[in-house]
Image (cartoon, grey):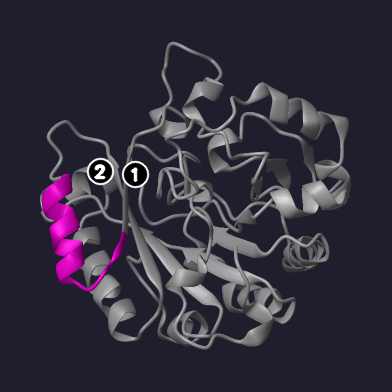
Amino acid sequence: MTTATRTAIQSVELEITGTCQLRCTHCCTESGPKASHGDMTREDWQRVITDIAELGIPAVQFIGGEPTLAPYLPEYIDHALAAGLKVEVYSNLTHIRPGLWSAFQRPGVCLATSYYSDRAEEHEQITNGPGSYQRTRGNISEAVSRGIPLRVGIVEVLEGQRVDQTQAELRQLGVSAIKVDHMRKVGRAADSATSIPSTSELCGNCFRRRVSVDPNGAVSGCILSRFLVAGNVHEQPLAAILHSDRWQDLIKAVPAPRSACGPDDSSDCDPAGTEACDPAYFAPDPTPSLGGTA
């Protein structure tokens, strides 16, 4: 792995499960209640986390599906922190087991979630999850009250969606890190007229600054670019995949980031588009081994 590659990639998304309580209309991974956890074992994920740290990549994001449904999430968080990685958990926050809050409150951990409307009926029209609005809203408040660094993404899915009012509600709840993005035509929101999504739907940071590993070990540039597979960690070490000719070819295939597309572009529609655990999200005096810039 070259020094240039080591410093270019800023975070890795680990899709530790495909299972989710919700079935959002725009989900880029098509996760849902009937999706599986995948065939990556606890040992497989721990090995990948170790590889990420050894490559000098500074941050990891646990995502899904819904990562809080994965059996070993607290262990993965502990393993990543022990390896010196910054950690973000991207959850829909519809249900947090009591024991998970202590894991989220560890220095070096931050949370991210999706929130679509200040009205339950509109939020739940998008999530297809009755009651999800109140549960997510309540857990946003809980995270804020516990002092857990939190960012929230709003994706414009419906025409006339109450985006401005939703931002105002989030600010009232104490959330300051809020980003808004449009729906990307991948996954469940893909254009039915095309067999493969267009690379124009990607922000340009995938493969260049981001990496994603799906529940079955397939490696791509981010969860939006799952249709561009570079390899599989069951077959090759992550370092070999990132240093392969295939990886370089995929970098060339994806349009470079647009000038208006900053590192925090795309919020929850493109979780890799935001640097996991921006140091600004951390409470003062974080653990020294987790310091530095993203």
Q: Is residue 279 left or right of residue 135?
A: right
Which residue position holds label 2?
A: 126
286 displayed left or right of 4 = left
In the rendered image, the residue lying farthest to the top is: 193
Q: Nearer the viewer, residue 199 or 237?
A: 199
Q: Is residue 77 above or below residue 261?
A: below
Quarter-of-image position of residue 292: bottom right
| Mark 1 secondary-structure assignment | loop
Q: Quadrant of the C terminus?
A: bottom right
Closest to the observer, 190 or 176: 176
SS class of the residue under badge 2? helix
Displayed quadrant of residue 87: bottom right
**Residue at 14% in and 59% down:** 168
Q: In the rendering, at what x and y percent does residue 122 appear?
A: 15, 46
Regarding residue 236, the answer to whether it shows in the image is no
Q: Amino acid at mark 2?
A: Ile
> What residue is rendered at 71% in x and 33% in y?
229
As drawn, the label of residue 24 is 1
> Residue shown at 59%/42% (left/top)?
222
Magenta-tinted stretch: 163-177
Tell me if residue 271 is in the magenta stretch. no
Would you say residue 165 sits in the magenta stretch?
yes
First in sequence, mark 1 or 2: give its number: 1
Circles 1 and 2, Cβ within 8 Å, touching? The answer is yes
Q: Is residue 39 left or right of residue 294?
A: right
Q: Is residue 54 visible?
A: yes
Q: Residue at x 62, y 77 (%)?
A: 291
Which three-letter amino acid code belongs to the residue tagged 1? Cys
Mark 2 neighbour density, 10 Å: few (under 14) some (14–19) many (20 or more)? many
How far apart marks 1 and 2 lie (CA) works out to 5 Å
Q: Main secondary structure of the magenta part?
A: helix
Label for residue 121?
none
